[in-house]
């Protein structure tokens, strides 16, 4: 009897197991379904791929880049240098440039093309052309080169704006080829206006635009643009803790477009800048020098020499009449002291050059000077500076 009960239990267990197996196979218990009969799972399906709406600022970036980038070129300048054993080798460097017109004229920085034996320009469409130097202006670190054989339909000049209307805080955009990465866009603001910087060749550049738009090696010669896509400056240099090989730290400088317009017009027409000049040579008066010489003013230019045949000579200005020894140095004394031009103070020859920079040969300026203790003013016509004194 006991064996029959055990047999009954075993049969019942087997039948129950078989029934459960059949239920699973027939999906009568969906949560345990097998292959081919899995329950349908509702997956999270992504929406149709699309960009979120562009902000007004992003739209400006896109419009300016689309309008201006076809006019920004990459310049490779190759100079011949010599190694330790005086063996010549080619030394290429890269910069940016801006198409000025359909004649293939391109403006860039002087330091990009200086001493170059050959120039090659790559347009944004990847076509390359040989270029020739039209003229350069080291004073403002600007130069114009011209493409050889470029078809006009491949050229897209960038419109020049007005740098005199700029305001601090205004949005600006820079396009260039930093580290040979062609047509790179960066954005920022006008950080300051009217800066005065000294270029690598020692020349002072006036009314420079300061910006925090990222400018790196290779950006030199590229355009600084306003939100209308107009060029308002040519990017020329940065302040970098690492020197010339360092990167951007948010302090960059651009030559204002009003200076660019004046310079490139002369370079294209004349091959040189028609720079005004009076024919005066002198040196800066310090407070110590004024005290030692008992001068009537403690700042200005003490004229040392007047070049013969110049407008300064025709106006009757006087240079030094004698020498004295002061603290182991020979000092030329007796000349007139220039203190102002058109009401603007003149404290050094750099000041004099910068004040005349915006003038043209043939213009007149009102010169304020001292002869002895007597203050005098005269109108003096400016002449073109001879090449030999540049």
Image (spheres, grey):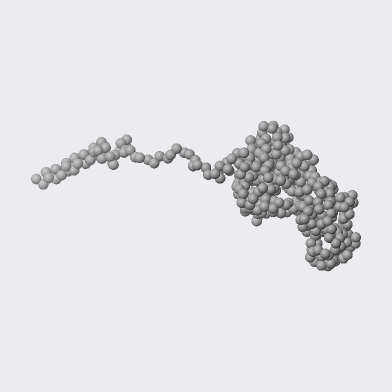
Residue 66 in the figure: left or right of residue 142: left
Give the answer, above or below, for where 318 lies relative to 130: below
Residue 321 in the figure: left or right of residue 95: right
Camera-nearest residue between 121 and 205: 205
Figure quadrant of the N terminus: top left
x and y percent of residue 94 in the render? 68, 44
Residue 291 in the figure: left or right of residue 208: right
Res. 235 visible in picture? no
Q: Residue at left 30%, top 36%? A: 37
How many tags in the picture? 0
Give the answer, above or below, for where 303 lies relative to 257: below
x and y percent of residue 159 in the render? 67, 40
Q: Residue at left 83%, top 64%? A: 296
x and y percent of residue 192 in the render? 65, 53
x and y percent of residue 22 in the render? 23, 37
Q: Which residue is most to the left? A: 1
Q: Residue at left 87%, top 55%? A: 317
Camera-nearest residue between 329 and 41: 329
Res. 224 visible in picture? yes
Q: Residue at left 87%, top 50%? A: 310
């Amino acid at each position: 009897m006991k064996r029959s009960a055990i047999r009954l239990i075993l049969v019942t267990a087997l039948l129950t197991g078989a029934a459960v197996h059949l239920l699973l196979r027939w999906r009568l218990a969906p949560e345990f379904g097998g292959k081919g009969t899995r329950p349908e799972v509702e997956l999270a399906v992504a929406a149709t791929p699309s960009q979120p709406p562009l902000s007004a600022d992003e739209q400006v970036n896109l419009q300016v880049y689309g309008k201006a980038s076809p006019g920004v070129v990459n310049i490779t300048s190759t100079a011949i240098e010599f190694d330790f054993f005086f063996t010549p080798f080619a030394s290429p460097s890269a910069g940016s440039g801006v198409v000025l017109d359909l004649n293939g004229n391109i403006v860039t920085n002087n330091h990009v093309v200086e001493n170059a034996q050959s120039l090659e320009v790559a347009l944004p469409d990847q076509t390359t052309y040989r270029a020739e130097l039209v003229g350069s202006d080291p004073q403002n670190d600007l130069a114009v080169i011209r493409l050889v054989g470029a078809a006009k339909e491949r050229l897209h000049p960038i419109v020049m704006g007005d740098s005199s209307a700029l305001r601090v805080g205004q949005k600006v955009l820079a396009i260039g080829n930093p580290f040979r990465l062609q047509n790179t866009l960066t954005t920022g603001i006008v950080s300051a206006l009217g800066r005065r910087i000294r270029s690598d060749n020692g020349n002072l550049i006036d009314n420079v635009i300061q910006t925090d738009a990222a400018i790196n090696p290779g950006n030199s010669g590229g355009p600084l643009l306003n939100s209308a896509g107009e060029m308002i400056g040519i990017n020329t240099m940065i302040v970098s803790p690492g020197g010339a090989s360092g990167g951007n730290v948010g302090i960059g400088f651009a030559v204002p477009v009003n200076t660019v317009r004046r310079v490139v017009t002369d370079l294209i027409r004349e091959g040189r800048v028609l720079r005004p000049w009076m024919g005066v040579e002198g040196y800066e008066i310090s407070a110590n020098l004024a005290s030692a010489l008992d001068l009537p003013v403690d700042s200005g230019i003490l004229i040392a020499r007047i070049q013969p045949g110049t407008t300064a000579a025709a106006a009757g200005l006087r240079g030094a009449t004698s020498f004295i020894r002061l603290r182991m140095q020979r000092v030329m004394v007796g000349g007139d002291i220039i203190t102002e031009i058109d009401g603007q103070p003149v404290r050094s020859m750099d000041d004099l050059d910068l004040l005349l920079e915006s003038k043209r040969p043939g213009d007149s300026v009102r010169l304020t000077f001292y002869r002895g203790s007597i203050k005098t003013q005269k109108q003096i016509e400016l002449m073109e500076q001879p090449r030999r004194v540049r």
